[in-house]
Image (cartoon, rainbow, N blue to C red):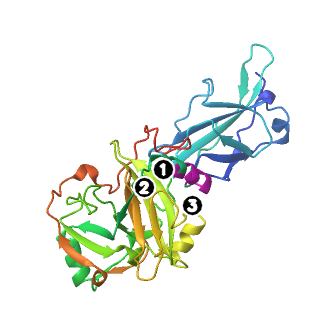
Amino acid sequence: MAVMDSLSTPHNIQISEVTCDSFRIAWEMPPQDAGRVTHYFIDLSRKEGGDPNRFKHRDVPTKLVAKAVPLPMAVRGHWFLSPRTEYCVAVQTAVRQPEGGDYLVSDWSQVVEFCTGDYAMVHLQQLLEKAKGASGRMLRFSVFYRNQHPDYFHYVRTVCGGVMYPALKDNSGSHGSPINGTLQGIFFSCNTEFDTGLPPNDSPYGPLRFQIPAGYLLNPSTCLYFADFYCMYTAYHYVILVLAPAGSEGDNFCRSRLPKLDLADNPFLTYSPPQREGEEPVFCHTRDVILEVFFTEPVHLGQGTLVEISGHHQLMSQSTANAKKDPSCKVCNISVGR
């Protein structure tokens, strides 16, 4: 084939408008190529270390063959992209030949790396609707609690002046949750046994339990947000909620990233104000999922009590520390990744 028929290699690859499941891609090529290119070949792979240029040879069909369109080209739905994941991408341009349907192709471009984003509000709304479908009837409760080993509370007393300070959220749950590795808080539980109305006697996190009256964390000056819904290859499903005092740094973070819930009317965790003078507010939690409540402010041990629980404390299969979400579960997954 004549040299003048060859195509130049695409260069200056640009990735823009990256979301958790889509991106736009553009590159530069000479006007004489742009006028005759009929197709784009795009190859994408997860970044896994080593030489990222592991793409196919020029005579082997690529992962995506797209008809030439004005650049930047939107890439959505061609691959099952995962949130917060590093990818490598390279492109070829091609001219389809009239005889036999073969392609005249350029060399592969330089490999470009990019990282997909978090779940957007629309994706979290989809996850919220799934979580609503899994929630059941509500049970009353009176305390939030946090289980840990004695060393933890000893450290809080001796080093932190009796204050439990927020820590960065780990990567447990859905990979695309916007709070993973970005929001600081303290995890509390509120689930109770349906037959006693009391917290369970066992925990995978330790034999000491800090209990605090529910109204200290959940009250009219607190904002409640939905952050995640997941499972860990078990029958249990978990919902992560964020509690943040109105106007706080945590509230400001969540306001544009997470769906806000009505304190008095949601299927997970509710506060009902007293109806008459002298009455106490009513606090309820859903029975059919395990709630993990992430409170974004420091909590002093003096606000509650520390008790030893009598059950088993080696239930590590129920620990959610850095737990990975089951990507095959149809109950808690949405179509944009895990």
Q: Are marks 1 and 3 in contact (CB under 8 Å)?
A: no
Whether residue 181 can be seen here: no
Q: Is residue 335 left or right of residue 189?
A: right
Q: Is residue 74 left or right of residue 81?
A: right
Secondary structure, magenta segment, majority class: helix
What residue appears at the point 41 percent right and 82 percent down from the top-left corner?
A: 278
Rendering quarter of residue 56: top right
Q: What residue sits right under mark 2 in the picture? A: 239
Q: Is residue 13 above or below residue 6?
A: below
Query: Which residue matches tag 3?
Result: 259
Quick one: SS at disc 3? loop
Identify the disc placed on residue 112: none
Q: Is residue 123 magenta?
A: yes
Q: Residues within 10 Å of mark 3 (few under 14, many from 20)?
A: some
Q: Is there a contact, CB below 8 Å, between mark 1 and mark 2?
A: yes
From which residue to which does the magenta span run? 119-128
Tell me the quarter of the picture where residue 279 sits. bottom left
Amino acid type indicated by mark 3: Pro
Q: Going by the picture, which residue comes out furthest to the top?
A: 100
Helix, strand or loop for disc 1: helix
- Tell me the kind of residue under disc 1: Ala
Badge 2 marks a residue whose secondary structure is: strand
Q: Residue at coordinates 46% horizontally, 51% vertically from top-left?
A: 175
Q: Name the N-terminal-most of marks 1 and 3.
A: 1
- Numbered circle sitting on residue 131: 1
